[in-house]
């Protein structure tokens, strides 16, 4: 069952590209070759624009399913871009208002090499001031309601009501606290970061 969150106004993040200069990125070990800089958008490689358009036409099932929930400001009134070029990468989904990148991780992300690549990509996104959310492909396909609930909580924690089915007990200071299991955690990059 899907939870519907009433639309409430929220403050738009005033994202500024001021300070995102070639020198700043190079000082943070981010390659700047081929990047286009502007005061209106994040630095990106214009050579990736056509490739990102092509990716929109051959997306994985999980990306299509999540896009159907995010497009046209349907989710919390937030605007998302799909297959957005940022730096020398293409983000699955990008929300400028919240400064968030959402990545859907399928089986190809489980190898050691792919995890290292994803970690470097996430580091570079964080240098830009972006938050990265990684969600397992299978969670999108099999637990969309849970994914949307997690996204709503992450994107608007002040507006998301607590889960009434979750029993709240006072913490015991001698007991080790473990976070509740919400999404798959098959490897360090699945779920929320």
Image: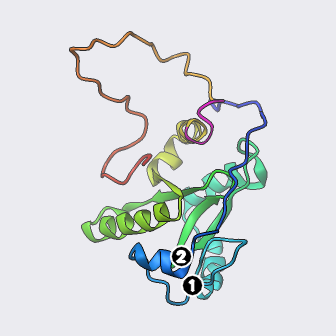
Q: For residue 95, what is the image quadrant? A: bottom right
Residue at the outermost left position = 174
Nearest to the observer: residue 33 or residue 142: 33
What's drawn in magenta, residue-wise?
A: 154-159
Tell me: 179 left or right of 47.
Answer: left
Assess whether mark 1 and mark 2 are in contact (beta carbons under 8 angstroms): yes
- Looking at the rendered structure, the secondary structure element under dot 2 is loop
Q: Position of residue 105 (x, y in %)?
A: 44, 59
Which quarter of the image is occupied by the N terminus?
top right
Q: Which residue is mark 1?
A: 35
Ranked by sequence position, the earlier of labels 2 and 1 is: 1
Q: Give the CA separation, mark 2 to mark 1.
A: 7 Å
Q: Which residue is mark 2?
A: 87
Q: Magenta segment: does it hold 157? A: yes
Evaluate whether residue 108 shows in this view: no
Q: Position of residue 60 (x, y in %)?
A: 54, 64
- Looking at the rendered structure, the secondary structure element under dot 1 is loop
Q: Residue at x 68, y 71 (%)?
A: 41
Q: Residue at x 49, y 74 (%)?
A: 24
Nearest to the observer: residue 168 or residue 37: 37
Q: For residue 91, what is the image quadrant? A: bottom right
Tell me: 169 left or right of 12.
Answer: left
């Amino acid at each position: 069952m899907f939870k519907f969150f009433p639309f409430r106004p929220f403050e738009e993040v005033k994202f500024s590209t001021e300070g995102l200069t070639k020198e700043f990125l190079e000082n943070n070990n981010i390659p700047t070759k081929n990047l286009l800089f502007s005061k209106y958008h994040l630095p990106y490689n214009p050579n990736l624009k056509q490739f990102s358009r092509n990716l929109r036409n051959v997306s994985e099932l999980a990306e299509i399913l999540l896009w159907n929930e995010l497009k046209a400001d349907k989710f919390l009134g937030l605007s998302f871009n799909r297959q957005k070029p940022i730096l020398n990468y293409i983000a699955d989904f990008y929300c400028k208002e919240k400064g968030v990148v959402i990545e859907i991780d399928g089986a190809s992300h489980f190898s050691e090499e792919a995890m290292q690549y994803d970690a470097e990509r996430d580091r570079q996104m964080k240098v830009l001031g972006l938050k990265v959310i990684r969600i397992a492909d299978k969670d999108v396909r099999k637990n969309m309601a849970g994914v949307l609930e997690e996204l709503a909580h992450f994107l608007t924690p002040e507006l998301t009501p607590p889960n009434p089915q979750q029993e709240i007990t006072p913490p015991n200071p001698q007991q080790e606290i473990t976070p509740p299991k919400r999404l798959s955690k098959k490897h360090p990059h699945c779920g929320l970061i």
